[in-house]
Structure formats: C-alpha cells, structure tokens
C-alpha cells in the first residue's frame, strides 16, 4: 500500500528539497553539431559583420557629391575607371568625376561613398550617365552595421536554432561551448513486455514506454540511454538499476510501482543508497503509483506502466528536472480557454487530468471534449488529445458548458 499520497505541489517540493537539478557540465562542439544545444557562455563577436563596406545592389560606386543634380533629362556624366567583383579586394580608386562598376556584395572601392543602381544609369563607351542622384551611404552596408566587433551577440543559456547557427557562422566560429546533455537511463519492466522488432507471442505486448520516454527526454535536451526490458525479478531489477545509476545522471523506470506482488521497484530503490524513496504515490489521476527516489545524489523516477499515465507524469514531474540539468529554460505550456462539451468528474481526493481534444462550433468557439482513456496499456489517449483540463482535488465536477482552461501539449496548436 502507498504510505502517503502527496499532492502534486507537495511532491514537487519534496523532490526540490532532496535534489537540486543543475547543468551536468560543459563541452565544446563543432558548429555542425550545435543545433538545439544550449550556450554555456556568452558569445562576443571577434570581428565586424560585414568586415568591410559593401554594395547592396548591382550598379556603380560613386562619390555622392558627383551625382547631385542628376535627373532623367539631364544625367551626370562620369568617367568609367574599372570594376569591383565579389570576393576580391578593389584594385581601383574612385576619384572626383569617376565611377566603378560594382556587384552586389562586393567591397566598396576607396574614394567611393555611395552606389548608383544600374537601373538608373546608361553606359556608353567609357562614360556612365547617371539619371538619379544618391546620398552618401546610399545602397551601402557599412562595416559592422550588422554586428560590431566586441558586441555580445548571443547569451549564455540561449538555445541554438538555425538563426543562431547562422550568426555563429558569420563570425567565423567553428565550435561553441554548450552544456552537456544529461544522460538519462530508461528501463522498462514487466514479464509481458517485448522489445519492438522481436517476435511477439500470446500474452505479450510491445514496449511502448521506453520509446515514448526516450523521445520525451530528447525533446527536453537530454540523451536517452535505453537499457531495454527487465523482468519483474528482484535481483535483475536491482542489477539493472545499479547499472543505470553508474552510467547516467538520472534514471527513469516504467512499470512495477503499483501494489501487486510483482511490483518491486520501490523495494529495490529503498536498498540502493541514501536517502532512497522520497515519494511513494501521488494524489493525482492518472499517475497515482508514481514513485521517486534519490540515490547518492541521482534521481530515479519510477513511472506507472500505463503509457498515458507514464508520459503525463513525465511532463508534470520529470521534464522540468531534465530541462534544468540540460541548462534549458523549460517551455511553458500554451493555454487556451474552451467550453466543456460534457460533464467532467475528478477522482475523489485526487488532482485529475482529463485528456481532451479541441474542436470549434459554428460560432468559432473552442469546445473541449474528453478523450476516452481506454483500458490499461492504451497509448492512443495522448496521441488523440490536444491537451488536458486540470481538475483540483476539492472540485466536485465541471459542468457541461462551463469554461475551462486547456493546457496544450507541446507541438499542438489551438
């Protein structure tokens, strides 16, 4: 039996008092491997970007003063003095009354301070006729106008997406300091569980949790280590958890935490180190059997075998911890307001999470309809759900037509 069912808030506080998550280390990675990693230090620009004044159009580099007064009927005539190509240092100098042909992205030649677009010029032999004046700096991107040398361009704790990778490349960097990914060992338990890809016999089911939990660990910045399926046999479970603890920063198990004769995970965790089991059951539905231990400074999250319960409790309890260990700021769930499609009842004395999907009525109002939970082992509940409605312990029910707050799952859109 569960000694005491803690509320969700009590469980989070108890965990916080026994384990303080923090980044597990820092490493340098190549730019090609930096996507979705978290910066472990500020990035200060070592160069100006661009490193030189460059043309933003195809046209003619000029001294702006030479174009004053030019118009369609009375163009200004300038002497052609050469060309400036992209990727090459200019070999010409633009003096008064002269101009040089220039390509988009090419460095501005010495003496020039503006560029006339090719559309507003006509070339005849060695003379360029300019039909529109330009001001100083027009059609020119100045050195350092994008990024100044010495500027802090990316901040510690920032996740690197494609845009940030582009900035790092523009600075000429080939590697960057990031937080290490916490290694999270994952163990599935149960005599009925078979790893996908292996033959399945009557009475067996394929392992769902190892793969959903591994994907969930990746989503919050961790590195999953799938240690496979372990039978409900104490010696094997103990050996598996010891191995997991020695090779990882945290451990997640699924199954074996209820009150049946084969549910031995809490007993095993109580013998492996101090302080041992700190949470044995929570006043929530689904997820009541959730058990948490801290063994010699490492957390062990033992989640229910029911796939929906397991993944939901991962998001409620485990995800914030792994995010902090990965140096990430946890993404907050997007919430929307909707109307309950039917009456919703909580489990007595327990915080209840009702999975719902969202539709819109003819007036465009969001309607939250409970997703049938199915029997033990059902995985489709979370796949079909857009989010969940949280019903507090003291609330008796939610009425049909009552406004509710729906917490959207990551990746779902309202």
Image (cartoon, grey):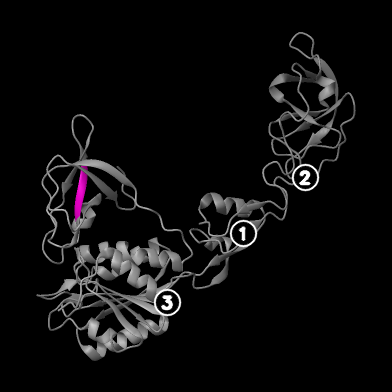
Name the residue located 20 percent from the left edge and 87 percent from the top edge: 233
The answer to whether the residues at label 2 and label 1 have Cβ atoms under 8 Å apart is no
Name the residue located 36 percent from the left edge and 64 percent from the top edge: 319
Q: Mark 3 points at which residue?
A: 249
The image quadrant that residue 197 belongs to is bottom left
Crowding near the residue tagged with mark 2, few <14, some 14–19, many ≥20 C-alpha atoms within 10 Å:
few
Image location (x, y in percent) of residue 249: 42, 77
Label 2 sits on a secondary structure element that is loop
Q: What number is the disc on residue 174?
A: none
Per the picture, the main secondary structure of the magenta-coloured stretch is: strand
Q: Of tags 3 and 2, which is closer to the observer?
A: 3
Total label count?
3
Label 1 sits on a secondary structure element that is loop
Q: How far apart are marks 2 and 1 (CA)?
A: 33 Å
Image location (x, y in percent) of residue 271: 29, 89
Sequence-earlier tag: 2 or 1: 1
* Residue 189 falls within the magenta-colored stretch: no
Residue ranking furthest to the front: 394
Horizontally, is 338 left or right of 122 in the view? left
| Front residue (pair 223, 122) | 223
From which residue to which does the magenta span run?
A: 354-358
Image location (x, y in percent) of residue 406: 26, 47
Q: Can residue 178 be seen in this view?
A: yes
- The quarter of the rendered structure image containing the C terminus is top left
Horizontally, is 17 left or right of 283 in the view? right
Q: Mark 2 points at which residue?
A: 88
Horizontally, is 37 left or right of 403 in the view? right
Image location (x, y in percent) of residue 227: 32, 79
* Residue 357 falls within the magenta-colored stretch: yes
Q: What number is the disc on residue 42?
A: 1
**360 vs 370: above or below:** above
The answer to whether the residues at label 3 and label 1 have Cβ atoms under 8 Å apart is no
């Amino acid at each position: 039996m569960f000694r005491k069912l803690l509320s969700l808030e009590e469980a989070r506080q108890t965990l916080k008092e026994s384990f303080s998550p923090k980044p597990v280390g820092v490493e340098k990675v190549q730019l090609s491997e930096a996507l979705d990693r978290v910066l472990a230090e500020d990035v200060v620009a070592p160069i100006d970007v661009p490193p030189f004044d460059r043309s933003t159009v195809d046209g003619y580099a000029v001294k702006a003063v030479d174009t004053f007064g030019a118009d369609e009927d009375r163009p200004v005539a300038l002497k052609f003095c050469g060309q400036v190509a992209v990727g090459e240092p200019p070999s010409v100098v633009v003096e008064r009354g002269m101009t040089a042909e220039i390509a988009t992205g090419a460095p501005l030649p010495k003496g020039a301070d503006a560029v006339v677009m090719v559309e507003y010029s006509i070339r005849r032999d060695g003379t360029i006729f300019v039909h529109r004046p330009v001001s100083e700096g027009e059609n020119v991107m100045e050195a350092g106008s994008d990024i100044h040398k010495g500027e802090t361009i990316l901040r510690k704790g920032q996740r690197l997406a494609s845009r940030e990778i582009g900035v790092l490349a523009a600075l000429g960097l080939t590697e960057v300091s990031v937080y290490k990914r916490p290694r999270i060992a994952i163990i599935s338990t149960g005599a009925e569980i078979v790893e996908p890809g292996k033959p399945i016999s009557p009475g067996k089911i394929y392992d769902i949790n190892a793969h959903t939990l591994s994907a969930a660990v990746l989503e919050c910045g961790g590195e999953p280590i799938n240690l496979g399926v372990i039978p409900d046999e104490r010696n094997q479970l103990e050996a598996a958890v010891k191995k997991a603890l020695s090779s990882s920063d945290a451990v997640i198990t699924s199954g074996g935490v209820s009150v049946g004769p084969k549910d031995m995970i809490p007993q095993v965790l109580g013998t492996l180190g101090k302080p041992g089991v700190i949470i044995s059951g929570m006043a929530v539905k689904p997820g009541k059997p959730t058990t948490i231990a801290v063994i010699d400074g490492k957390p062990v999250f033992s989640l229910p075998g029911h796939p929906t319960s397991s993944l939901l409790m991962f998001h409620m309890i485990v995800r914030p911890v792994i995010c902090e260990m990965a140096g990430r700021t946890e993404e907050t769930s997007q919430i929307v307001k909707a109307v309950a499609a039917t009456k919703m009842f909580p489990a007595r004395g327990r915080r209840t999470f009702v999975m719902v999907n969202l539709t819109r009525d003819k007036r465009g109002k969001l309607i939250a309809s409970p997703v049938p939970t199915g029997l033990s082992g059902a995985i489709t509940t979370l796949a079909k759900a857009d989010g969940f409605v949280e019903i507090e312990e003291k609330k008796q029910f939610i009425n049909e037509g009552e406004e509710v707050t729906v917490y959207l799952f990551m990746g779902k859109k309202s």
